[in-house]
Image: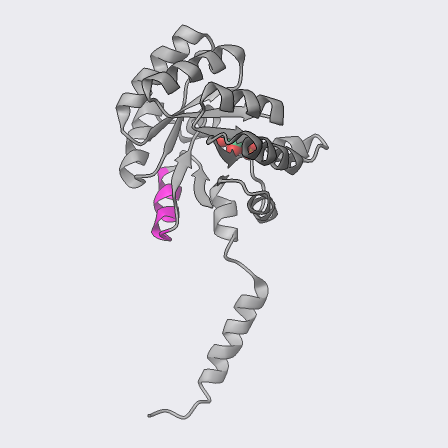
């Protein structure tokens, strides 16, 4: 399973990259707005830090506008993946991007029918949002199971990139469903390694180690 971080904060990305298991980064307009920086400048810097896929989102919502921006993003760095919303105009653009060899991450996916359309259009990644569905009383992970089944039924190579993750259990469940990628907010990324029994167990081992006689 691949781990991405879902942030536009370069300090967080640098920190996450230090662990050595970071595979990529996803951003969106809301995350970039929080930084107060220009979108392109942020993406250029992220592409220097992480050589894996870096998702940069288009802002226009019409086919021509999406394509114009997609072509610009694709030239920023070889590892840029163009993030396109799951709307009719967006799907048309995904088809053209696939023809032109531009990698895409289709975002704002909330059910398996939308995910099927994205795969048919030739998306590189599909981003189903689990947390936002849970927030309104739906079971976000049900959609991931369905998408996995549908993609496997037809051999679609579009990678399932689980987004809108709120806590480590979302990651565990996404992995159990066979998702290809999980994109994690930095605070969730940091929580993954933590277990109170690990900390307590280590403290006890270190304390007991002091009682071991020194020398060979
Ligand atoms: O980047 C897309 C997605 O991960 C957003 O998550 O927390 O805004 O629902 P969230």
Residue 91 in the image: above or below residue 170: above
The residue drawn where x is 47% and y is 19% is 121
Q: How many marks?
A: 0
Asked if one can make out residue 82 in the rendered structure from this viewpoint, the answer is yes
Residue 116 in the image: above or below residue 4: above
Quarter of the image where one finds residue 151: top right
> Left or right of 213: which side holds 136?
right
The residue drawn where x is 37% and y is 42% is 13
> Left or right of 58: which side holds 215?
left
The picture places residue 170, in percent across and down from the top left corner, at 59, 44
The picture places residue 108, in percent across and down from the top left corner, at 54, 24
Q: Quadrant of the C terminus?
A: bottom left
Residue nearest the observer in this picture, 1 or 134: 1
Residue 72 in the image: above or below residue 194: above
Magenta stretch containing residue 136, yes or no? Answer: no
Residue nearest the observer in this picture, 110 or 210: 110
> Left or right of 151: which side holds 122?
left
The residue drawn where x is 36% and y is 35% is 53
Residue nearest the observer in this picture, 185 or 87: 87
Magenta stretch containing residue 11, yes or no? Answer: yes
Quarter of the image where one finds residue 73: top left
The picture places residue 205, in percent across and down from the top left corner, at 50, 78
The residue range painted magenta reads 10-20
**Magenta-drawn stretch, dominant element (helix, strand or loop):** helix
């Amino acid at each position: 399973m691949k781990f991405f971080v879902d942030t536009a904060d370069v300090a967080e990305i640098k920190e996450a990259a230090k662990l050595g298991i970071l595979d990529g980064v996803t951003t969106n307009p809301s995350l970039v707005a929080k930084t107060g920086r220009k979108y392109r400048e942020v993406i250029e810097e992220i592409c220097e830090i992480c050589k894996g896929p870096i998702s940069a989102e288009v802002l226009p919502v019409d086919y021509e506008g999406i394509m114009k921006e997609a072509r610009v993003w694709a030239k920023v760095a070889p590892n840029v993946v163009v993030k396109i919303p799951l709307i009719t105009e967006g799907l048309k653009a995904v088809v053209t991007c696939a023809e032109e060899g531009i990698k895409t991450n289709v975002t704002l996916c909330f059910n398996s029918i939308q995910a099927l359309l994205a795969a048919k259009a030739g998306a590189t990644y599909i981003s189903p949002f689990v947390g936002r569905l849970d927030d309104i009383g739906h079971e976000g992970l049900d959609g991931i199971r369905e998408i996995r089944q549908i993609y496997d039924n037809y051999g679609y190579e579009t990678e399932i990139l689980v987004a809108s993750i709120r806590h480590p259990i979302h990651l565990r469940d996404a992995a159990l469903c066979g998702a290809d990628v999980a994109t994690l907010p930095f605070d969730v990324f940091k929580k993954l390694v933590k277990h109170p029994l690990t900390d307590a167990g280590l403290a006890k081992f270190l304390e007991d180690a002091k009682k071991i006689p020194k020398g060979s």
